Image (tube, helix red, strand yellow):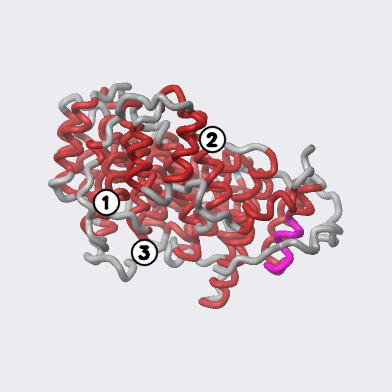
C-alpha cells in the first residue's frame, strides 16, 4: 500500500463540520458516513482536525471504523483486504497502552487503511452490505432462527434474526449464538475467531448501542466458506470441530481449577509435536480427564504457536499467535460449558494443522524449550531496553538471548510499555499491529514460568528501535503536537 504524507489541509473545514448537533446515534451515523464518503486524500486531515478540537473521541471512532468496514469491505475471504476490520481491536488495545498524541497513531493508520481496503473491495466486486430487512422475527424466535439459518447457510434469515437481537439489546446472547460459527472452522487460516473476538471487545469498550450494522456484517462474514490457494489439503479447515466436539464429554469440571504444573505442559507440548491434529486433541482430552489442568493445554497452545513463528517466521505462521490469542479471548468470555471445553481443543488442532498444511519455507529447527529464563542481566533496565531496541528486528539470536536474561517478573511493565511504543511508531502493516498486540497480551495469559520463552520466541516478528517509522509515526507530532497540553 502506498503511504502518503498528510501535512496540508489540517485547518480546512472537515467533511462533517457542518453536521448539526444531533443525538449520539445520529452523530455516530454521520461519522460512519464521513469515513465511507470522504476521499482518502483528505480523510486523515479531517479526522486529525476533529481530534484536535475534541469532536471525535476514540470509542466513537473505533465503532465507526468497524461499522464502515463490515459494510463496505467484502469478507470473501475473511482476510486479505478485510484486515482493515480485523485489526481494529489490535489498534484499540495498543492505543490504550499509550499516552498523549502517540496513542492515536494506530487508529489513524487504521483510518487510512480502511480507505485503501474500501477502494480495493470496490474495484474487485463493488459489494456493500444490503439494508436490513423490514420483516423481522419475534425476539423469542430469533435465536432458533439464527442457529437454523447458519446451519443451512441462509443469509437472509440469519440477517433477520441477528437484526432483531441487535435491536432488542441482546448483545451477549448474540455473542453466544455467533460463537460456534467463529470457532468451528479455520476458514482463511482462522480469521473468523479474530473477527468475533475483536468486535466483541471493541463493543465492550465503545458500547453496544448502534451496533446493528456491525453484528449484521459479522454474521455475513461468518457464513464465508472455502479454501485459499495455499491450502495443502482441501477441507482441512472444517474437519476438526466435529471430532473435538465429541471429546468434550471427557473433560471434567475440575479441569478448570487454576493450576499449571510446568512438567505437565512440557510433556504435552513434546507429544503434540509428534502427532496430527486429531491425535493431539484426543491426547489433550484424555489428559484433562486424568486431572491435567486446562491452563496446561492453553500454555501448550501458546508455546507451540510461538515455536512455529520462531521456526517459520512468515505471515501464515504468525496467525498461530493471533488466532490462539483470539480463541483464548473468546474462551474467557463464554459461559457455554460446551464451548469452554471445545475451544481449547480447537486451538490445539489449529496450531498442529497450520504446521502441517502450510509447510512453506524451511523449518529452522529451534526449540522454544531451550529459551527458558536464565540469571538476570546485571545491567540497568534502561540499558537492557536500549540493547533490545537495537537487536529486535535486526539480530534475532541476540534479541532472544537478551530476553532470556531480562528480569521479566520485576521489569515486565517497563518492557511492555517500550515494546508497545515501538509497535505504535514502527508498524506499517495490519499484521504488525495484530501480531504485536496479541503477543503483549498473551504474555500475561500464559503461566509465569513460560513467559520468557514465549516472548523470546515471538520477538522474531516484533518491532525494534532501529526499524523505520510509519507515515503516521513520522507525522504525529506535526498533526497533533500541543493538542492536549
What secondary structure is found at the residue carrying circle 2? helix
Is label 3 or label 1 in front? Answer: 1
Measure how far apart labels 2 and 3 are at the Cα level.
39 Å
Give the mark, 2 or 3, whose residue is nearer the N terminus.
3
Measure how far apart labels 1 and 2 are at the Cα level.
26 Å
Describe residue 48's horizontal placement relative to residue 74 as left or right.
Answer: right
Residue drawn at 20 percent across, 50 percent down: 365
Residue beneath disc 3: 225
Res 132 visible? no
Residue drawn at 36 percent across, 44 percent down: 458
Res 285 visible? yes
Give the mark, 3 or 1, whose residue is nearer the N terminus.
3
Residue drawn at 19 percent across, 27 percent down: 263
Is label 2 or label 3 in front? Answer: 2
Residue 311 is marked as 1
Reply above or below: 285 against 36.
above
Bin the neighbour count of mark 1 within 10 Å (Cα to Cα): few under 14, some 14-19, many 20 and up: some
Residue beneath disc 2: 417
What secondary structure is found at the residue carrying circle 3? loop
Describe residue 439's horizontal placement relative to residue 29 as left or right.
Answer: left
Reply above or below: 64 against 5.
above
Where, by quadrant of the figure, is residue 49 drawn? bottom right
Tag 3 near tag 1, CB within 8 Å: no
In the foreground, 395 or 6: 395
Instruction: Confirm whether the magenta stretch covers residue 412.
Output: no
Q: Where are the magenta residues, as a range?
A: 38-47
Which quarter of the figure is the C terminus placed in? top right
Q: Residue 329's spot in the image, x, y percent?
A: 43, 39
Q: Residue 468's spot in the image, x, y percent?
A: 54, 55
Amino acid at each position: 500500500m502506498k503511504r502518503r504524507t498528510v501535512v496540508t489541509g489540517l485547518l480546512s473545514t472537515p467533511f462533517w463540520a457542518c453536521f448539526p448537533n444531533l443525538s449520539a446515534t445520529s452523530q455516530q451515523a454521520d461519522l460512519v458516513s464521513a469515513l465511507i464518503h470522504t476521499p482518502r486524500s483528505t480523510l486523515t486531515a479531517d479526522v486529525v482536525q476533529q481530534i484536535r478540537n475534541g469532536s471525535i473521541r476514540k470509542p466513537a471512532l473505533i465503532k465507526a471504523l468497524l461499522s464502515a468496514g463490515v459494510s463496505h469491505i467484502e469478507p470473501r475471504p475473511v482476510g486479505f483486504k478485510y484486515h482493515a476490520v480485523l485489526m481494529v481491536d489490535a489498534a484499540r488495545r495498543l492505543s490504550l497502552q499509550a499516552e498523549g498524541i502517540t496513542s492515536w497513531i494506530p487508529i489513524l493508520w487504521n483510518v487510512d487503511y480502511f480507505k485503501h481496503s474500501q477502494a480495493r473491495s470496490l474495484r474487485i466486486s463493488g459489494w456493500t452490505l444490503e439494508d436490513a430487512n423490514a420483516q423481522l422475527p419475534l425476539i423469542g424466535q430469533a435465536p432458533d432462527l439464527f442457529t437454523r439459518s447458519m446451519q443451512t447457510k441462509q443469509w437472509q434469515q440469519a440477517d433477520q434474526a441477528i437484526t432483531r437481537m441487535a435491536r432488542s439489546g441482546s448483545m451477549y446472547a448474540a455473542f453466544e449464538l455467533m460463537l460456534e460459527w467463529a470457532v468451528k472452522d479455520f476458514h482463511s487460516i482462522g480469521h473468523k475467531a479474530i473477527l468475533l473476538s475483536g468486535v466483541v471487545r471493541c463493543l465492550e469498550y465503545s458500547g453496544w448501542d448502534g451496533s446493528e450494522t456491525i453484528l449484521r456484517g459479522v454474521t455475513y462474514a461468518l457464513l464465508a466458506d472455502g479454501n485459499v490457494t495455499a491450502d495443502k489439503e482441501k477441507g482441512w479447515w472444517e474437519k476438526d470441530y466435529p471430532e473435538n466436539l465429541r471429546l468434550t464429554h471427557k473433560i471434567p469440571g475440575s479441569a478448570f481449577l487454576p493450576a499449571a504444573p510446568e512438567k505437565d505442559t512440557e510433556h504435552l507440548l513434546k507429544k503434540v509435536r509428534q502427532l496430527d491434529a486429531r491425535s493431539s486433541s484426543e491426547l489433550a482430552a484424555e489428559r484433562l480427564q486424568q486431572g491435567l489442568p486446562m491452563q496446561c493445554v492453553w500454555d501448550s497452545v501458546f508455546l507451540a504457536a510461538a515455536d512455529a513463528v520462531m521456526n517459520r517466521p512468515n505471515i501464515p505462521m504468525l496467525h498461530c499467535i493471533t488466532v490462539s490469542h483470539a480463541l483464548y479471548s473468546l474462551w474467557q468470555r463464554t459461559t457455554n460449558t460446551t464451548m469452554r471445553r471445545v475451544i481449547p481443543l480447537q486451538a490445539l488442532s489449529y496450531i498442529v494443522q497450520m504446521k502441517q498444511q502450510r509447510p512453506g519455507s524451511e523449518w529452522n529447527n529451534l526449540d522454544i524449550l531451550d529459551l527458558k529464563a536464565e540469571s538476570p542481566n546485571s545491567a540497568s533496565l534502561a540499558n537492557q531496553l536500549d540493547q533490545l531496541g537495537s537487536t529486535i528486528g535486526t539480530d534475532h539470536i541476540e534479541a532472544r538471548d537478551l530476553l532470556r536474561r531480562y528480569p521479566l517478573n520485576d521489569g515486565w511493565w517497563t518492557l511492555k510499555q517500550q515494546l508497545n511504543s515501538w509497535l505504535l511508531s514502527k508498524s506499517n502493516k495490519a499484521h504488525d499491529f495484530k501480531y504485536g498486540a496479541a503477543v503483549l497480551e498473551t504474555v500475561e495469559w500464559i503461566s509465569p514460568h513460560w513467559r520468557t520463552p514465549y516472548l523470546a520466541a515471538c520477538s522474531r516478528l516484533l518491532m525494534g528501535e532501529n526499524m523505520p517509522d510509519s507515515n503516521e509515526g513520522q507525522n504525529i507530532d506535526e498533526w497533533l503536537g500541543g493538542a492536549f497540553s
